[in-house]
Protein backbone atom coordinates (compact mmCIF):
# COMPACT_ATOMS: atom_id res chain seq x y z
CA UNK A 1 0.00 0.00 0.00
CA UNK A 2 1.37 3.41 -1.00
CA UNK A 3 2.11 6.22 1.44
CA UNK A 4 -0.80 8.24 -0.02
CA UNK A 5 -3.20 5.33 0.49
CA UNK A 6 -2.03 4.91 4.07
CA UNK A 7 -2.66 8.65 4.64
CA UNK A 8 -6.25 8.22 3.38
CA UNK A 9 -6.80 5.43 5.87
CA UNK A 10 -5.51 7.67 8.65
CA UNK A 11 -7.92 10.41 7.54
CA UNK A 12 -10.76 7.88 7.66
CA UNK A 13 -9.98 7.11 11.31
CA UNK A 14 -10.29 10.82 12.25
CA UNK A 15 -13.30 11.51 10.00
CA UNK A 16 -16.00 13.44 11.94
CA UNK A 17 -18.78 14.03 9.41
CA UNK A 18 -20.46 12.54 6.35
CA UNK A 19 -19.16 15.51 4.32
CA UNK A 20 -15.54 14.64 5.19
CA UNK A 21 -16.24 10.98 4.41
CA UNK A 22 -17.50 11.89 0.92
CA UNK A 23 -14.37 13.97 0.27
CA UNK A 24 -12.08 11.08 1.29
CA UNK A 25 -14.15 8.66 -0.80
CA UNK A 26 -13.81 10.91 -3.85
CA UNK A 27 -10.03 11.15 -3.35
CA UNK A 28 -9.77 7.34 -3.04
CA UNK A 29 -11.76 6.91 -6.28
CA UNK A 30 -9.50 9.30 -8.20
CA UNK A 31 -6.35 7.53 -6.97
CA UNK A 32 -7.91 4.06 -7.56
CA UNK A 33 -7.25 3.09 -3.93
CA UNK A 34 -10.56 1.22 -3.81
CA UNK A 35 -9.07 -1.58 -5.89
CA UNK A 36 -7.56 -2.70 -2.58
CA UNK A 37 -10.21 -4.80 -0.66
CA UNK A 38 -8.73 -3.68 2.67
CA UNK A 39 -9.13 0.02 1.80
CA UNK A 40 -12.74 -0.56 0.66
CA UNK A 41 -13.59 -2.36 3.87
CA UNK A 42 -12.07 0.46 5.95
CA UNK A 43 -14.17 3.01 4.06
CA UNK A 44 -17.25 0.90 4.70
CA UNK A 45 -16.41 0.57 8.41
CA UNK A 46 -15.84 4.34 8.75
CA UNK A 47 -19.19 5.16 7.15
CA UNK A 48 -20.98 3.06 9.80
CA UNK A 49 -19.84 5.52 12.48
CA UNK A 50 -22.65 7.84 11.31
CA UNK A 51 -26.10 6.42 12.17
CA UNK A 52 -28.77 6.30 9.46
CA UNK A 53 -27.07 8.39 6.75
CA UNK A 54 -23.84 6.44 7.14
CA UNK A 55 -25.69 3.11 7.10
CA UNK A 56 -27.49 3.97 3.86
CA UNK A 57 -24.20 5.09 2.35
CA UNK A 58 -22.52 1.86 3.45
CA UNK A 59 -25.22 -0.23 1.76
CA UNK A 60 -24.67 1.60 -1.52
CA UNK A 61 -20.91 1.23 -1.13
CA UNK A 62 -21.16 -2.52 -0.48
CA UNK A 63 -23.30 -2.96 -3.59
CA UNK A 64 -20.42 -1.53 -5.68
CA UNK A 65 -17.81 -3.96 -4.32
CA UNK A 66 -17.42 -6.93 -6.72
CA UNK A 67 -16.63 -9.50 -4.02
CA UNK A 68 -17.24 -8.15 -0.48
CA UNK A 69 -15.43 -9.96 2.29
CA UNK A 70 -17.35 -11.64 5.11
CA UNK A 71 -15.91 -8.98 7.41
CA UNK A 72 -17.55 -6.26 5.25
CA UNK A 73 -20.92 -8.04 5.38
CA UNK A 74 -20.61 -8.56 9.14
CA UNK A 75 -19.82 -4.89 9.76
CA UNK A 76 -22.93 -3.73 7.96
CA UNK A 77 -25.13 -6.45 9.51
CA UNK A 78 -24.04 -5.38 13.01
CA UNK A 79 -24.88 -1.72 12.26
CA UNK A 80 -28.33 -2.62 10.90
CA UNK A 81 -29.07 -4.92 13.85
CA UNK A 82 -28.30 -2.08 16.28
CA UNK A 83 -30.36 0.47 14.30
CA UNK A 84 -33.96 1.54 15.10
CA UNK A 85 -35.08 -0.98 12.43
CA UNK A 86 -33.38 -4.26 13.38
CA UNK A 87 -35.56 -6.25 10.96
CA UNK A 88 -33.51 -4.76 8.10
CA UNK A 89 -30.50 -6.78 9.29
CA UNK A 90 -32.41 -10.04 8.76
CA UNK A 91 -33.43 -9.15 5.20
CA UNK A 92 -29.86 -8.00 4.49
CA UNK A 93 -28.54 -11.32 5.81
CA UNK A 94 -30.63 -13.08 3.15
CA UNK A 95 -28.85 -10.92 0.54
CA UNK A 96 -25.54 -12.04 2.00
CA UNK A 97 -26.48 -15.73 1.69
CA UNK A 98 -27.76 -15.17 -1.87
CA UNK A 99 -24.43 -13.59 -2.84
CA UNK A 100 -22.59 -16.77 -1.91
CA UNK A 101 -20.75 -15.20 1.04
CA UNK A 102 -20.15 -17.66 3.87
CA UNK A 103 -21.17 -16.52 7.38
CA UNK A 104 -18.85 -17.16 10.31
CA UNK A 105 -19.14 -17.04 14.10
CA UNK A 106 -19.01 -13.21 14.04
CA UNK A 107 -22.02 -13.00 11.72
CA UNK A 108 -24.62 -14.45 14.08
CA UNK A 109 -24.48 -12.57 17.44
CA UNK A 110 -25.86 -9.24 16.12
CA UNK A 111 -28.54 -11.08 14.12
CA UNK A 112 -29.65 -13.07 17.15
CA UNK A 113 -29.75 -9.83 19.14
CA UNK A 114 -32.01 -8.36 16.44
CA UNK A 115 -34.36 -11.34 16.85
CA UNK A 116 -34.41 -10.72 20.60
CA UNK A 117 -35.33 -7.04 20.05
CA UNK A 118 -38.12 -8.11 17.68
CA UNK A 119 -39.21 -11.11 19.83
CA UNK A 120 -39.03 -13.06 16.56
CA UNK A 121 -38.76 -16.68 17.69
CA UNK A 122 -39.19 -18.10 14.17
CA UNK A 123 -36.21 -16.18 12.74
CA UNK A 124 -34.21 -16.96 15.89
CA UNK A 125 -34.82 -20.70 15.47
CA UNK A 126 -33.74 -20.50 11.82
CA UNK A 127 -30.53 -18.71 12.80
CA UNK A 128 -29.88 -21.34 15.46
CA UNK A 129 -30.15 -24.02 12.76
CA UNK A 130 -27.70 -22.15 10.51
CA UNK A 131 -25.28 -21.74 13.41
CA UNK A 132 -25.25 -25.51 13.89
CA UNK A 133 -24.72 -25.99 10.16
CA UNK A 134 -21.81 -23.53 10.18
CA UNK A 135 -20.34 -25.09 13.37
CA UNK A 136 -20.75 -21.77 15.20
CA UNK A 137 -23.16 -22.89 17.94
CA UNK A 138 -20.36 -23.56 20.45
CA UNK A 139 -18.87 -20.08 20.12
CA UNK A 140 -19.48 -18.42 23.49
CA UNK A 141 -20.75 -15.15 21.94
CA UNK A 142 -23.22 -17.08 19.78
CA UNK A 143 -24.31 -19.14 22.78
CA UNK A 144 -24.91 -16.06 24.91
CA UNK A 145 -26.89 -14.44 22.10
CA UNK A 146 -29.11 -17.52 21.79
CA UNK A 147 -29.77 -17.64 25.56
CA UNK A 148 -30.75 -13.96 25.49
CA UNK A 149 -32.91 -14.39 22.37
CA UNK A 150 -34.87 -17.35 23.74
CA UNK A 151 -35.39 -15.54 27.04
CA UNK A 152 -36.61 -12.40 25.26
CA UNK A 153 -39.10 -14.60 23.37
CA UNK A 154 -40.36 -15.99 26.73
CA UNK A 155 -38.84 -19.41 25.96
CA UNK A 156 -36.28 -19.42 28.74
CA UNK A 157 -36.36 -23.24 28.95
CA UNK A 158 -34.84 -23.35 25.45
CA UNK A 159 -32.24 -20.84 26.62
CA UNK A 160 -31.44 -23.18 29.52
CA UNK A 161 -31.04 -26.08 27.08
CA UNK A 162 -28.54 -24.04 25.03
CA UNK A 163 -26.67 -23.17 28.24
CA UNK A 164 -26.50 -26.83 29.32
CA UNK A 165 -25.30 -28.11 25.94
CA UNK A 166 -22.57 -25.53 25.28
CA UNK A 167 -18.99 -26.49 26.08
CA UNK A 168 -17.81 -23.10 27.31
CA UNK A 169 -19.40 -20.60 29.69
CA UNK A 170 -18.21 -17.15 30.63
CA UNK A 171 -19.69 -14.71 33.17
CA UNK A 172 -22.00 -13.30 30.49
CA UNK A 173 -23.48 -16.78 29.88
CA UNK A 174 -24.51 -17.08 33.53
CA UNK A 175 -25.80 -13.51 33.62
CA UNK A 176 -27.88 -14.02 30.46
CA UNK A 177 -29.56 -17.04 32.02
CA UNK A 178 -30.18 -15.27 35.34
CA UNK A 179 -31.65 -12.23 33.55
CA UNK A 180 -33.79 -14.51 31.40
CA UNK A 181 -35.33 -16.20 34.42
CA UNK A 182 -35.77 -12.83 36.19
CA UNK A 183 -37.53 -11.27 33.19
CA UNK A 184 -39.86 -14.27 33.00
CA UNK A 185 -40.66 -13.96 36.72
CA UNK A 186 -38.97 -17.29 37.60
CA UNK A 187 -36.97 -16.02 40.57
CA UNK A 188 -36.49 -19.45 42.18
CA UNK A 189 -34.81 -20.72 39.01
CA UNK A 190 -32.74 -17.54 38.77
CA UNK A 191 -31.58 -17.98 42.37
CA UNK A 192 -30.48 -21.57 41.72
CA UNK A 193 -28.35 -20.41 38.76
CA UNK A 194 -27.00 -17.50 40.86
CA UNK A 195 -26.03 -19.87 43.70
CA UNK A 196 -24.38 -22.30 41.25
CA UNK A 197 -22.17 -19.64 39.66
CA UNK A 198 -18.47 -20.40 40.16
CA UNK A 199 -17.72 -16.67 40.39
CA UNK A 200 -20.30 -13.93 40.80
CA UNK A 201 -19.65 -10.51 39.35
CA UNK A 202 -21.38 -7.29 40.28
CA UNK A 203 -23.72 -7.67 37.26
CA UNK A 204 -24.94 -11.02 38.63
CA UNK A 205 -25.69 -9.52 42.05
CA UNK A 206 -27.49 -6.57 40.50
CA UNK A 207 -29.59 -8.85 38.27
CA UNK A 208 -30.84 -10.83 41.28
CA UNK A 209 -31.48 -7.70 43.35
CA UNK A 210 -33.42 -6.23 40.41
CA UNK A 211 -35.48 -9.45 40.15
CA UNK A 212 -36.44 -9.44 43.83
CA UNK A 213 -37.16 -5.70 43.73
CA UNK A 214 -39.33 -6.07 40.63
CA UNK A 215 -41.38 -8.82 42.29
CA UNK A 216 -41.89 -6.73 45.43
CA UNK A 217 -39.71 -8.97 47.65
CA UNK A 218 -37.84 -6.06 49.19
CA UNK A 219 -36.55 -8.19 52.09
CA UNK A 220 -34.63 -10.58 49.81
CA UNK A 221 -33.41 -7.67 47.68
CA UNK A 222 -32.04 -5.90 50.76
CA UNK A 223 -30.46 -9.10 52.09
CA UNK A 224 -28.52 -9.61 48.84
CA UNK A 225 -27.56 -5.93 48.78
CA UNK A 226 -26.09 -6.22 52.27
CA UNK A 227 -24.18 -9.40 51.31
CA UNK A 228 -22.57 -7.90 48.19
CA UNK A 229 -18.76 -7.92 48.37
CA UNK A 230 -18.72 -4.71 46.35
CA UNK A 231 -21.41 -2.40 44.98
CA UNK A 232 -21.67 0.03 42.10
CA UNK A 233 -24.06 2.90 41.58
CA UNK A 234 -26.57 0.59 39.83
CA UNK A 235 -26.83 -1.53 43.01
CA UNK A 236 -27.84 1.51 45.05
CA UNK A 237 -30.20 2.84 42.36
CA UNK A 238 -32.04 -0.48 42.08
CA UNK A 239 -32.73 -0.63 45.82
CA UNK A 240 -33.74 3.05 46.02
CA UNK A 241 -36.32 2.42 43.28
CA UNK A 242 -37.49 -0.78 44.99
CA UNK A 243 -38.16 0.99 48.30
CA UNK A 244 -39.88 3.77 46.36
CA UNK A 245 -42.28 1.32 44.67
CA UNK A 246 -43.11 -0.08 48.12
CA UNK A 247 -43.69 3.52 49.36
CA UNK A 248 -40.85 3.14 51.87
CA UNK A 249 -39.68 6.65 51.10
CA UNK A 250 -37.74 6.94 54.35
CA UNK A 251 -35.55 3.99 53.32
CA UNK A 252 -35.17 5.33 49.79
CA UNK A 253 -33.97 8.67 51.16
CA UNK A 254 -31.64 6.97 53.66
CA UNK A 255 -29.96 4.96 50.89
CA UNK A 256 -29.78 8.03 48.67
CA UNK A 257 -28.02 9.98 51.43
CA UNK A 258 -25.60 7.10 52.13
CA UNK A 259 -24.53 6.59 48.50
CA UNK A 260 -20.78 7.11 48.00
CA UNK A 261 -21.45 8.58 44.54
CA UNK A 262 -24.55 9.43 42.52
CA UNK A 263 -25.40 9.71 38.84
CA UNK A 264 -28.42 11.15 37.03
CA UNK A 265 -30.26 7.82 37.45
CA UNK A 266 -29.85 8.04 41.25
CA UNK A 267 -31.49 11.47 41.35
CA UNK A 268 -34.19 10.28 38.96
CA UNK A 269 -34.91 7.21 41.13
CA UNK A 270 -35.33 9.35 44.26
CA UNK A 271 -37.43 12.00 42.51
CA UNK A 272 -39.63 9.29 40.97
CA UNK A 273 -40.05 7.65 44.38
CA UNK A 274 -41.36 10.93 45.83
CA UNK A 275 -43.56 11.71 42.80
CA UNK A 276 -45.16 8.25 42.79
CA UNK A 277 -45.37 8.20 46.59
CA UNK A 278 -47.74 11.20 46.70
CA UNK A 279 -44.98 13.55 47.85
CA UNK A 280 -44.78 15.93 44.86
CA UNK A 281 -43.40 18.86 46.89
CA UNK A 282 -40.42 16.77 48.01
CA UNK A 283 -39.83 15.68 44.39
CA UNK A 284 -39.69 19.30 43.22
CA UNK A 285 -37.45 20.32 46.14
CA UNK A 286 -35.02 17.52 45.26
CA UNK A 287 -34.93 18.71 41.65
CA UNK A 288 -33.91 22.18 42.84
CA UNK A 289 -31.08 20.59 44.83
CA UNK A 290 -30.10 18.56 41.77
CA UNK A 291 -30.09 21.68 39.57
CA UNK A 292 -27.89 23.61 42.00
CA UNK A 293 -25.33 20.80 41.75
CA UNK A 294 -25.41 21.05 37.91
CA UNK A 295 -26.57 17.45 37.49
CA UNK A 296 -28.31 17.06 34.13
CA UNK A 297 -31.67 15.27 34.52
CA UNK A 298 -32.62 12.43 32.21
CA UNK A 299 -35.97 11.80 30.53
CA UNK A 300 -37.32 9.78 33.48
CA UNK A 301 -36.53 12.65 35.89
CA UNK A 302 -38.39 15.18 33.74
CA UNK A 303 -41.43 12.89 33.45
CA UNK A 304 -41.54 12.38 37.24
CA UNK A 305 -41.23 16.13 37.89
CA UNK A 306 -44.03 16.99 35.49
CA UNK A 307 -46.15 14.29 37.12
CA UNK A 308 -45.47 15.94 40.50
CA UNK A 309 -46.61 19.30 39.08
CA UNK A 310 -49.79 17.63 37.80
CA UNK A 311 -50.53 16.22 41.26
CA UNK A 312 -50.05 19.60 42.95
CA UNK A 313 -51.66 21.73 40.26
CA UNK A 314 -48.35 23.61 40.27
CA UNK A 315 -48.60 25.36 36.90
CA UNK A 316 -45.73 27.81 37.44
CA UNK A 317 -43.39 25.00 38.51
CA UNK A 318 -44.46 23.08 35.41
CA UNK A 319 -43.71 26.07 33.21
CA UNK A 320 -40.27 26.41 34.79
CA UNK A 321 -39.51 22.76 34.01
CA UNK A 322 -40.77 23.26 30.44
CA UNK A 323 -38.45 26.28 30.12
CA UNK A 324 -35.58 24.19 31.52
CA UNK A 325 -36.23 21.57 28.80
CA UNK A 326 -36.15 24.24 26.07
CA UNK A 327 -33.14 26.08 27.52
CA UNK A 328 -31.07 22.90 27.70
CA UNK A 329 -32.23 21.78 24.24
CA UNK A 330 -33.57 18.49 25.60
CA UNK A 331 -35.38 16.37 23.03
CA UNK A 332 -39.15 16.64 23.48
CA UNK A 333 -40.00 13.10 22.42
CA UNK A 334 -43.39 11.42 22.67
CA UNK A 335 -42.93 10.58 26.35
CA UNK A 336 -41.95 14.07 27.54
CA UNK A 337 -44.40 15.71 25.13
CA UNK A 338 -47.30 13.59 26.39
CA UNK A 339 -46.40 14.34 30.00
CA UNK A 340 -46.27 18.08 29.25
CA UNK A 341 -49.71 17.91 27.64
CA UNK A 342 -51.07 16.04 30.66
CA UNK A 343 -49.52 18.53 33.11
CA UNK A 344 -50.87 21.62 31.36
CA UNK A 345 -54.32 20.05 30.96
CA UNK A 346 -54.55 19.00 34.63
CA UNK A 347 -53.47 22.50 35.67
CA UNK A 348 -56.30 23.92 33.53
CA UNK A 349 -54.02 25.55 30.94
CA UNK A 350 -55.50 23.96 27.81
CA UNK A 351 -54.00 26.50 25.38
CA UNK A 352 -50.45 25.53 26.43
CA UNK A 353 -51.34 21.85 26.16
CA UNK A 354 -52.54 22.44 22.59
CA UNK A 355 -49.29 24.30 21.74
CA UNK A 356 -47.20 21.35 22.94
CA UNK A 357 -49.45 18.89 21.09
CA UNK A 358 -49.28 20.82 17.80
CA UNK A 359 -45.47 21.06 17.99
CA UNK A 360 -45.00 17.36 18.82
CA UNK A 361 -43.65 15.26 15.93
CA UNK A 362 -44.41 12.44 15.59
CA UNK A 363 -47.61 12.00 17.59
CA UNK A 364 -48.40 8.53 18.92
CA UNK A 365 -51.61 7.17 20.43
CA UNK A 366 -50.52 8.30 23.91
CA UNK A 367 -50.08 11.96 22.92
CA UNK A 368 -53.43 11.97 21.08
CA UNK A 369 -55.10 10.38 24.10
CA UNK A 370 -53.53 12.88 26.51
CA UNK A 371 -54.85 15.83 24.46
CA UNK A 372 -58.33 14.29 24.10
CA UNK A 373 -58.36 13.65 27.85
CA UNK A 374 -57.16 17.21 28.48
CA UNK A 375 -60.09 18.64 26.51
CA UNK A 376 -62.48 16.26 28.30
CA UNK A 377 -61.53 17.09 31.90
CA UNK A 378 -61.64 20.82 31.15
CA UNK A 379 -65.15 20.65 29.69
CA UNK A 380 -64.28 21.00 25.99
CA UNK A 381 -66.37 18.04 24.80
CA UNK A 382 -66.76 19.20 21.19
CA UNK A 383 -63.00 19.72 20.78
CA UNK A 384 -62.30 16.29 22.30
CA UNK A 385 -64.63 14.55 19.83
CA UNK A 386 -63.25 16.58 16.91
CA UNK A 387 -59.69 15.58 17.86
CA UNK A 388 -60.76 11.93 18.16
CA UNK A 389 -62.13 12.07 14.60
CA UNK A 390 -58.90 13.69 13.38
CA UNK A 391 -56.89 10.97 15.12
CA UNK A 392 -58.80 8.26 13.26
CA UNK A 393 -58.45 10.10 9.92
CA UNK A 394 -54.67 10.21 10.39
CA UNK A 395 -54.61 6.45 10.84
CA UNK A 396 -53.74 6.34 14.54
CA UNK A 397 -55.58 3.45 16.18
CA UNK A 398 -57.20 4.39 19.51
CA UNK A 399 -56.60 2.19 22.56
CA UNK A 400 -58.68 1.49 25.67
CA UNK A 401 -57.46 4.65 27.44
CA UNK A 402 -58.43 6.78 24.42
CA UNK A 403 -62.02 5.57 24.74
CA UNK A 404 -62.07 6.36 28.46
CA UNK A 405 -61.03 9.93 27.57
CA UNK A 406 -63.56 10.42 24.77
CA UNK A 407 -66.41 8.85 26.79
CA UNK A 408 -65.49 11.17 29.66
CA UNK A 409 -65.85 14.07 27.20
CA UNK A 410 -69.33 12.83 26.26
CA UNK A 411 -70.23 12.65 29.94
CA UNK A 412 -69.17 16.25 30.62
CA UNK A 413 -70.92 17.45 27.46
CA UNK A 414 -74.15 15.50 27.95
CA UNK A 415 -73.63 13.79 24.58
CA UNK A 416 -75.63 10.59 25.09
CA UNK A 417 -75.99 9.46 21.46
CA UNK A 418 -72.31 10.01 20.69
CA UNK A 419 -71.37 8.05 23.82
CA UNK A 420 -73.60 5.12 22.81
CA UNK A 421 -72.05 5.08 19.33
CA UNK A 422 -68.47 5.22 20.67
CA UNK A 423 -69.13 2.54 23.28
CA UNK A 424 -70.55 0.17 20.66
CA UNK A 425 -67.75 0.98 18.19
CA UNK A 426 -65.12 -0.21 20.64
CA UNK A 427 -66.08 -3.84 20.04
CA UNK A 428 -67.62 -3.65 16.55
CA UNK A 429 -65.13 -1.32 14.80
CA UNK A 430 -61.90 -1.41 16.81
CA UNK A 431 -62.01 -4.93 18.28
CA UNK A 432 -61.58 -3.69 21.85
CA UNK A 433 -63.46 -5.26 24.75
CA UNK A 434 -65.02 -2.60 27.03
CA UNK A 435 -63.57 -2.71 30.54
CA UNK A 436 -65.00 -1.61 33.87
CA UNK A 437 -63.74 1.95 33.26
CA UNK A 438 -65.76 2.21 30.02
CA UNK A 439 -68.90 0.90 31.70
CA UNK A 440 -68.39 3.46 34.49
CA UNK A 441 -68.17 6.26 31.89
CA UNK A 442 -71.36 5.07 30.19
CA UNK A 443 -73.18 4.82 33.52
CA UNK A 444 -72.07 8.37 34.26
CA UNK A 445 -73.27 9.60 30.83
CA UNK A 446 -76.69 7.97 31.25
CA UNK A 447 -76.98 9.00 34.89
CA UNK A 448 -76.21 12.68 34.23
CA UNK A 449 -78.83 12.64 31.46
CA UNK A 450 -81.43 11.27 33.89
CA UNK A 451 -81.65 7.88 32.12
CA UNK A 452 -81.35 6.02 35.42
CA UNK A 453 -83.30 2.90 34.40
CA UNK A 454 -81.06 2.39 31.33
CA UNK A 455 -78.00 2.95 33.52
CA UNK A 456 -79.17 0.26 35.98
CA UNK A 457 -79.72 -2.17 33.08
CA UNK A 458 -76.15 -1.51 31.90
CA UNK A 459 -74.75 -2.17 35.38
CA UNK A 460 -76.73 -5.40 35.67
CA UNK A 461 -75.47 -6.55 32.24
CA UNK A 462 -71.98 -6.87 33.70
CA UNK A 463 -70.94 -10.47 34.58
CA UNK A 464 -70.16 -9.29 38.09
CA UNK A 465 -71.65 -6.20 39.63
CA UNK A 466 -68.86 -3.77 40.36
CA UNK A 467 -69.01 -1.30 43.24
CA UNK A 468 -67.51 1.47 41.09
CA UNK A 469 -70.50 1.29 38.71
CA UNK A 470 -73.04 1.53 41.51
CA UNK A 471 -71.08 4.46 42.96
CA UNK A 472 -71.16 6.25 39.59
CA UNK A 473 -74.91 5.70 39.42
CA UNK A 474 -75.35 6.84 43.01
CA UNK A 475 -73.84 10.20 42.04
CA UNK A 476 -76.53 10.53 39.36
CA UNK A 477 -79.24 9.84 41.96
CA UNK A 478 -77.84 12.74 43.99
CA UNK A 479 -77.96 15.05 40.95
CA UNK A 480 -81.59 14.12 40.20
CA UNK A 481 -82.74 13.72 43.81
CA UNK A 482 -84.01 10.17 43.27
CA UNK A 483 -84.22 8.91 46.87
CA UNK A 484 -85.85 5.55 46.09
CA UNK A 485 -83.16 4.53 43.62
CA UNK A 486 -80.48 5.94 45.92
CA UNK A 487 -81.62 3.62 48.71
CA UNK A 488 -81.64 0.68 46.25
CA UNK A 489 -78.04 1.43 45.23
CA UNK A 490 -76.92 1.76 48.87
CA UNK A 491 -78.33 -1.72 49.51
CA UNK A 492 -76.31 -3.06 46.55
CA UNK A 493 -73.13 -1.33 47.80
CA UNK A 494 -73.58 -2.83 51.26
CA UNK A 495 -73.94 -6.28 49.65
CA UNK A 496 -70.60 -5.65 47.93
CA UNK A 497 -68.95 -4.72 51.25
CA UNK A 498 -68.74 -0.97 50.60
CA UNK A 499 -70.18 0.26 53.89
CA UNK A 500 -68.46 3.60 54.53
CA UNK A 501 -69.70 6.91 55.88
CA UNK A 502 -69.47 8.73 52.56
CA UNK A 503 -72.28 6.66 50.99
CA UNK A 504 -74.64 7.31 53.92
CA UNK A 505 -73.85 11.05 53.93
CA UNK A 506 -74.81 11.30 50.26
CA UNK A 507 -77.99 9.28 50.87
CA UNK A 508 -78.93 11.59 53.75
CA UNK A 509 -78.40 14.55 51.40
CA UNK A 510 -80.74 13.00 48.82
CA UNK A 511 -83.42 12.56 51.49
CA UNK A 512 -82.96 16.15 52.63
CA UNK A 513 -83.27 17.47 49.06
CA UNK A 514 -86.65 15.74 48.81
CA UNK A 515 -87.82 17.01 52.22
CA UNK A 516 -87.68 13.51 53.70
CA UNK A 517 -86.24 14.79 56.99
CA UNK A 518 -87.03 11.74 59.12
CA UNK A 519 -85.20 9.47 56.66
CA UNK A 520 -82.30 11.93 56.54
CA UNK A 521 -82.03 11.98 60.35
CA UNK A 522 -82.32 8.18 60.52
CA UNK A 523 -79.50 7.80 57.98
CA UNK A 524 -77.30 10.25 59.90
CA UNK A 525 -77.93 8.30 63.11
CA UNK A 526 -76.91 5.09 61.33
CA UNK A 527 -73.53 6.70 60.54
CA UNK A 528 -72.97 7.39 64.25
CA UNK A 529 -74.21 3.99 65.44
CA UNK A 530 -71.90 2.17 63.00
CA UNK A 531 -68.95 4.37 63.94
CA UNK A 532 -68.44 5.36 60.32
CA UNK A 533 -66.72 8.48 59.05
CA UNK A 534 -66.55 10.18 55.67
CA UNK A 535 -63.12 10.30 54.06
CA UNK A 536 -62.31 14.01 53.65
CA UNK A 537 -61.96 15.36 50.13
CA UNK A 538 -58.51 16.43 48.90
CA UNK A 539 -57.61 19.09 46.36
CA UNK A 540 -54.47 20.92 45.32
CA UNK A 541 -54.03 24.20 43.45
CA UNK A 542 -51.54 27.00 42.99
CA UNK A 543 -51.94 30.70 43.85
CA UNK A 544 -49.16 33.17 42.94
CA UNK A 545 -46.43 30.55 43.18
CA UNK A 546 -47.76 28.98 46.40
CA UNK A 547 -49.08 25.41 46.41
CA UNK A 548 -52.40 25.23 48.30
CA UNK A 549 -53.47 21.81 49.59
CA UNK A 550 -57.02 21.44 50.86
CA UNK A 551 -58.05 18.42 52.96
CA UNK A 552 -61.63 18.66 54.15
CA UNK A 553 -61.95 22.24 55.42
CA UNK A 554 -58.26 22.56 56.31
CA UNK A 555 -55.92 24.42 53.96
CA UNK A 556 -52.13 24.23 54.06
CA UNK A 557 -49.79 26.39 52.01
CA UNK A 558 -46.20 25.94 50.87
CA UNK A 559 -43.90 27.58 48.39
Image (tube, helix red, strand yellow):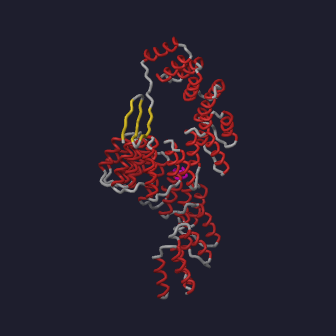
Magenta residues, start to end = 152-157
User: What percent of the width, then of the height, locates residue 20?
Assistant: 51, 77
User: What percent of the width, then of the height, locates residue 506?
Assistant: 51, 22
User: What percent of the width, then of the height, locates residue 134?
Assistant: 57, 67
Quick one: which residue is furthest to the top in this view?
Answer: 518
User: What percent of the width, then of the height, locates residue 56?
Assistant: 58, 69
Q: Is residue 300 visible?
A: no
Q: Is residue 154 magenta?
A: yes
Left/right of residue 550 with respect to residue 52 in the rendered view:
left
Q: Nearer the viewer, residue 411 or 498?
A: 411
Residue beneath the point at 62% across and 75% down: 63
Q: Quadrant of residue 74?
A: bottom right
Q: Nearer the viewer, residue 121 or 442?
A: 442
Q: Is residue 537 magenta?
A: no
Q: Nearer the viewer, residue 364 or 310?
A: 310
Location of residue 498 with respect to 215 vertically, above or below = above
Amino acid sequence: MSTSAASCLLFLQSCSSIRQLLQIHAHMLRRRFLDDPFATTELLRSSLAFPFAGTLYARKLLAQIPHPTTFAWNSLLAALAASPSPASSLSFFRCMLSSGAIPNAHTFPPLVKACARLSDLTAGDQLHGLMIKCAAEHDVYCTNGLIHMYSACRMVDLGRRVFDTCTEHDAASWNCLISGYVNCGLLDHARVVFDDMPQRGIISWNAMIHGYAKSGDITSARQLFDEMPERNVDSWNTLISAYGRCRRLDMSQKLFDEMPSRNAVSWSAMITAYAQGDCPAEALALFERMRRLDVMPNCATIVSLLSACSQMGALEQGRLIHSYIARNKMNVDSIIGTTLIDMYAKCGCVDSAVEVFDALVPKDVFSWTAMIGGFAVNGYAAQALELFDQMEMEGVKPNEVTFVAVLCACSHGGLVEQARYLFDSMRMVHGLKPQIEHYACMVDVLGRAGLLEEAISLVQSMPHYKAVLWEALFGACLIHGNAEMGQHIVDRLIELGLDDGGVYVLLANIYAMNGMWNDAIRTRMKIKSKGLSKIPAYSSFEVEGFSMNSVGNQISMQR
